[in-house]
Image: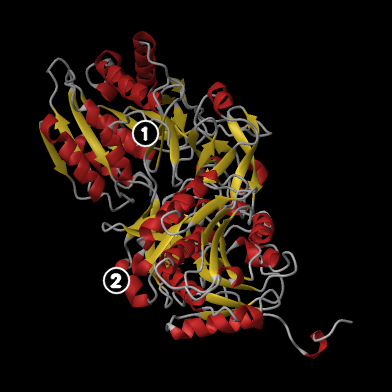
């Protein structure tokens, strides 16, 4: 799989939270050649299973590692049709300032290209142009007669950003929904590499639904897979003008391995060791509490799942021009493959917390 | 995407071309190729106006100018930061609010870049209520050093919005809806190319002008040199139809045909021309609308006061969201504007008498 072509296909596919069919069919097809089994759970997450292939490993005692990224994207939803124009609300979190005048696709009885309205400067006075237009005044326009619009669109229809994947200089690319299609791309590349390697652990690669509305897909999928350990891959804030180095990760600096209460310290150490073993550039991201990712939900699934988070730096997150360095996507794939392929079976036992207080029952 | 009706191929090429005010050469090259075989003479003047001449049948002694501007609003690179991001300024009237989260193409090499904005998660208190000014924004081309950025996009290069030319089914006449950048005024250019296929009774001068968006500047020198008896400006004008609580004049409406400008802040149209084109519309069954006389300014604002004055009229294709990265028009308006321009021009000798302004 060529990274740029893969990322383009993933990023340009539609998949608003709760309505991921468009992107799911792409992910499913891309998983199929490398997984033993691909299934879709009740909420719609796509689960690819790659069993351990180490002949020495007895089937009964194989621990499983779950690698996840979310495939849903932030979007808009029609709330009202008014004189041929559509009023909309958010599915996930946009800054309404990035929507003014943006091209979109309205998923009515057929996909229809439209524009979020903007007002030409001819029609506004300078004081008006100093105020952002709030979401409640941001109509979507299809350019069609009101009767035509009524026949095509109804309340509840989804509106996604019109994609335009663009390769920039220096191995960078920009598109909508690179959060978290960059993560999905890295998992698919990882799956491909893992399929060629020897593994003592079972591996599940899961494309989650509904992350942007509160990690809901992860709750269900983590319960269903019941892994011994999990690593989520998501987007983190890439360095950009206006952000300090303390609140952003370096672009082209490799995957950001997260540290904090959401993450298991042994798994964290293991990821660092894996990165060093393959000389993979990486960085450490401090997350003081809620990570805002699927890892937050996975950690408290069933009786607890040792978790880690590896993030790909993405600039201009939650805008139509999210920007990523393709090398970071590839490095993330290599890091995860190295981790998964080199996990000894006994590593699962080492994840249990065994300090003095935990030795006996109260 | 659904079925896509045909849009005129020339219009597509013109809209996709790079032509920020002062750097119209790519648009001019397309036009020159398009008109070369259908004119008697053409030249490019010192500002870059492309001026074509088509001799009349001899039945009229008038010399009539039709103008459309080649330039579009956009950005110009003002320099690079150490980090490799580019700073820019606006060329022409652009609302700062359309700038964040946009893709642009820089210079003739069309180097892609994006105008970023802070992630919504990290906004400071009150930041969401402020509009980032153009001078605070920057373009990311993927460069990681000043040198690399300057190599990709030297100071002074112009940048245009990266917008696809898209035609979708439907619209008032069922002929389709176009979403594209720079409909203002590539629609006028495309219509003017079409008019050059005609041979009118009068001598016909077609001026594809430069620098309209920075002050109607090219048209002024073109009209001075060509000494027309009357002028028709082919434009694209705003249609502001977004629902609003208070009564806002939409100026024009999509799907209602070409907009005749009776007056705007830049000029008063010659009543004889308004009458001739209105009658052309009625008699030929071409729908038209009269633009509400509130906003805008076109090359007619320059042309009508050249030398001893030139009776002028502007007719325009209505479009929504002009001066933003993507504007929208109904294809039927484009075709009707072309038809009305032809019919109206044909009627000009009768409407003006033999010496236009003088008689």
Kindly indicate the quadrant of the structure image that contains residue B60. top left
Vertical side of B59 occupied by A307: above or below: below
Which chain is mark 1 on?
Answer: B
Q: Quadrant of the N terminus of chain B?
A: top left
| Residue at figure coordinates x 35%, y 20% from the top left | B273
Q: Quadrant of the C terminus of chain B?
A: top left
Residue B260 placement, left or right of A91: left
- The picture places residue A46, in percent across and down from the top left corner, at 55, 53
Vertical side of A166 occupied by B69: above or below: above
Residue B307 placement, left or right of A116: left
Kindly indicate the quadrant of the structure image that contains residue A87. top right
Give the numbered dot on residue A135: none
| Residue at figure coordinates x 31%, y 18% from the top left | B344
Near-viewer residue (A125 or A3): A3
Secondary element under disc 1, as helix, strand or loop, is strand
| Residue at figure coordinates x 65%, y 36% from the top left | A156
The answer to which of marks 1 and 2 sits earlier in the sequence is 2
Distance between the alpha carbons at the discs numbered 1 and 2: 37 Å
Dot 2, how many residues are within 10 Å of its Cα: few (below 14), some (14-19), or many (20+)? few
Q: From this viewpoint, is residue A246 visible? A: no
Give the residue number, with chain letter if any, for mark 1.
B235
Give the residue number, with chain letter if any, for mark 2.
B151
Tag count in the figure?
2
- The picture places residue A251, in percent across and down from the top left corner, at 47, 73
């Amino acid at each position: 799989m060529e990274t740029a072509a893969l990322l383009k296909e993933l990023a340009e596919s539609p998949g608003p939270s709760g309505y991921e069919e468009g992107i799911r069919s792409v992910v499913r097809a891309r998983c199929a050649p490398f997984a033993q089994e691909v299934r879709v759970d009740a909420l719609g997450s796509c689960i690819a299973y790659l069993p351990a292939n180490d002949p020495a490993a007895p089937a009964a005692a194989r621990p499983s590692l779950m690698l996840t990224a979310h495939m849903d994207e932030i979007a808009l939803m029609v709330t009202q049709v008014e004189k041929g124009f559509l009023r909309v609300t958010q599915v996930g979190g946009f800054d309404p300032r990035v929507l003014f005048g943006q091209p979109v696709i309205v998923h009515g009885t057929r996909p229809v290209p439209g524009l979020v309205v903007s007002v030409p400067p001819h029609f506004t006075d300078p004081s008006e142009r100093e105020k952002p237009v709030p979401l409640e005044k941001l109509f979507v326009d299809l350019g069609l007669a009101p009767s035509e619009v009524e026949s095509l669109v109804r309340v509840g229809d989804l509106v996604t950003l019109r994609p335009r994947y663009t390769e920039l200089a220096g191995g960078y690319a920009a598109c909508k929904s690179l959060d978290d299609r960059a993560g999905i791309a890295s998992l698919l590349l990882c799956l491909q590499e893992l399929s060629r390697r020897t593994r003592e652990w079972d591996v599940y690669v899961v494309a989650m639904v509904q992350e942007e509305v509160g990690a809901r897909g992860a709750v269900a999928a983590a319960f269903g897979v019941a892994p011994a350990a999990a690593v989520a891959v998501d987007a983190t804030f890439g360095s950009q003008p206006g952000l300090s180095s303390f609140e952003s990760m370096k672009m082209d600096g490799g995957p950001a391995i997260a540290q904090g209460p959401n993450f298991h310290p042994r798994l964290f150490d293991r990821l660092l060791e894996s990165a060093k073993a393959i000389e993979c550039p990486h960085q450490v991201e401090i997350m003081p509490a809620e990570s805002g990712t699927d890892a937050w939900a996975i950690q408290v699934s069933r009786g607890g799942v040792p978790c880690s988070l590896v993030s790909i730096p993405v600039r201009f997150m939650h805008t139509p021009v999210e920007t990523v360095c393709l090398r970071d996507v590839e490095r993330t794939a290599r890091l995860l493959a190295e981790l998964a392929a080199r996990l000894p079976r006994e590593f699962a036992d080492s994840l249990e917390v065994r300090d003095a207080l935990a030795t006996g029952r109260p | 995407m659904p079925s896509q009706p045909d849009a005129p191929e020339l219009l597509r090429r013109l809209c996709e071309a790079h032509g920020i005010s002062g750097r119209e050469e790519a648009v001019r090259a397309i036009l020159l190729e398009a008109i070369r075989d259908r004119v008697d003479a053409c030249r490019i003047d010192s500002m870059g106006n492309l001026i074509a001449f088509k001799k009349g049948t001899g039945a009229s002694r008038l010399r009539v100018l039709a103008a459309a501007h080649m330039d579009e609003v956009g950005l110009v690179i003002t320099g690079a930061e150490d980090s490799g991001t580019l700073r820019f300024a606006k060329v022409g009237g652009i609302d700062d609010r359309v700038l964040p989260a946009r893709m642009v193409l820089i210079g003739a090499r069309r180097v892609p870049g994006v105008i970023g904005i802070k992630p919504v998660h990290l906004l400071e208190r009150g930041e969401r209520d402020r509009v980032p000014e153009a001078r605070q924004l920057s373009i990311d081309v993927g460069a990681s050093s000043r040198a690399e950025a300057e190599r990709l996009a030297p100071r002074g290069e112009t940048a245009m919005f990266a917008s696809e030319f898209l035609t979708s089914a439907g619209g008032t006449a069922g002929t389709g809806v176009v979403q594209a950048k720079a409909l203002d005024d590539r629609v006028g250019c495309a219509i003017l190319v079409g008019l050059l296929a005609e041979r009118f009774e009068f001598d016909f001068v077609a001026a594809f002008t430069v620098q309209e968006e920075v002050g109607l500047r090219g048209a002024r020198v073109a009209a001075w040199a060509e000494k027309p008896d009357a002028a028709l400006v082919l434009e694209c004008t705003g249609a502001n139809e977004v629902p609003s609580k208070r009564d806002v004049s939409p100026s024009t409406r999509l799907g209602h045909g070409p907009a005749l400008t009776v007056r705007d802040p830049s000029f008063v149209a010659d009543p004889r021309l308004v009458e001739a084109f209105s009658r052309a519309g009625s008699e030929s069954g071409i729908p038209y609308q009269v633009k509400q006389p509130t906003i805008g300014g076109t090359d007619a604002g320059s042309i009508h006061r050249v030398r001893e004055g030139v009776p002028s009229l502007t007719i325009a294709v209505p479009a929504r969201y002009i001066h933003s990265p993507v504007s929208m028009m109904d294809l039927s308006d484009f075709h009707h504007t072309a038809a009305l321009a032809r019919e109206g021009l044909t009627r000009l000798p009768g409407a003006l008498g033999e010496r236009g302004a003088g008689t």
